[in-house]
Amino acid sequence: MQRLKSSFLLVLLAAVALAQTASEKPSVDVRRVGARLACQCGCKDSVATCSMLECGFSKPAKEKIAQMQAAGMGDDQIIQAFIRDYGAGIYLAPPNALGWIIPYAAVAAGLVVIWLFLKKYRQPKPLAEIGPVEVDDPALAKYKEQIEKDLANLE
């Protein structure tokens, strides 16, 4: 009998834990709207992606979005309501064409710079034929004579 009670208690506890996580998980609609709103807790994420546990802003905001959706409000109406309540800084605009082009343009510009650098410094430049070098300095001539004597002694 004791074993049956403990098994029942374990199953009941697991069901309660699963029920809590399922109710806290926002729906796809809530996440879609929350992705366009900035979390105000200071984390630089959206309401849908805030990674703080028990965030003081995103959790109530998700609940408010769900309530507004249940009342029949559209995505734009909900976003306008949040902008009216919290200011224009809460709105996260979807990336425009410039936001998608800049990273690729930066990579292309970097590759062009690398290509130009390699093109300039990879090819050896021909040396001009200048002939034998004459030494004008008498001190250097003295050392040249010493070097010539030392080389003759080596042979």
Image (cartoon, rainbow, N blue to C red):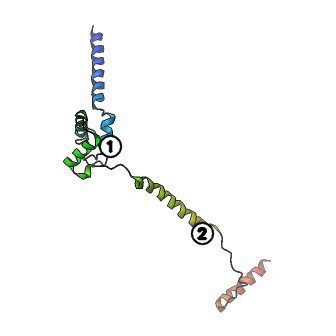
Q: Which mark is residue 116?
A: none
**Residue placed at 24% from the left, 52% from the top?**
88
Q: Nearer the viewer, residue 150 or 19?
A: 19
- Res. 50 visible in picture: no
Q: Residue 16 in the image: x percent, y percent?
A: 27, 23
Residue position marked by numbered label 2 in the rendering: 120
Determine the residue located farthest toward the right in the rendered image: 155
Quadrant location, the C terminus:
bottom right
**Residue placed at 42% from the left, 53% from the top?**
97
In terms of secondary structure, where does tag 2 sit?
helix
**What amino acid is labelled 2 in the image?**
Lys
Residue position marked by numbered label 1 in the rendering: 35
Near mark 1 (Cα within 10 A), the count class, few <14, some 14-19 or many ≥20, is many
Q: Residue 128 in the image: x percent, y percent?
A: 69, 80
Q: Residue 131 in the image: x percent, y percent?
A: 73, 84
- Res. 87 visible in picture: yes
Q: Residue 105 in the image: x percent, y percent?
A: 48, 58
**What amino acid is labelled 1 in the image?**
Ala
Image quarter of residue 123? bottom right
Determine the residue located farthest toward the left in the rendered image: 85
Find the distance from the CA under tag 2 to the CA under tag 1.
47 Å
> Does the CB distance between marks 2 and 1 fall below 8 Å?
no
Where 21 sits versus 52, above or below?
A: above
**Residue placed at 48% from the left, 55% from the top?**
104
Q: Nearer the viewer, mark 2 or mark 1?
A: 1
Near mark 2 (Cα within 10 A), the count class, few <14, some 14-19 or many ≥20, is few
Q: Nearer the viewer, residue 4 or 26?
A: 26
Where 99 sits versus 7, above or below?
A: below
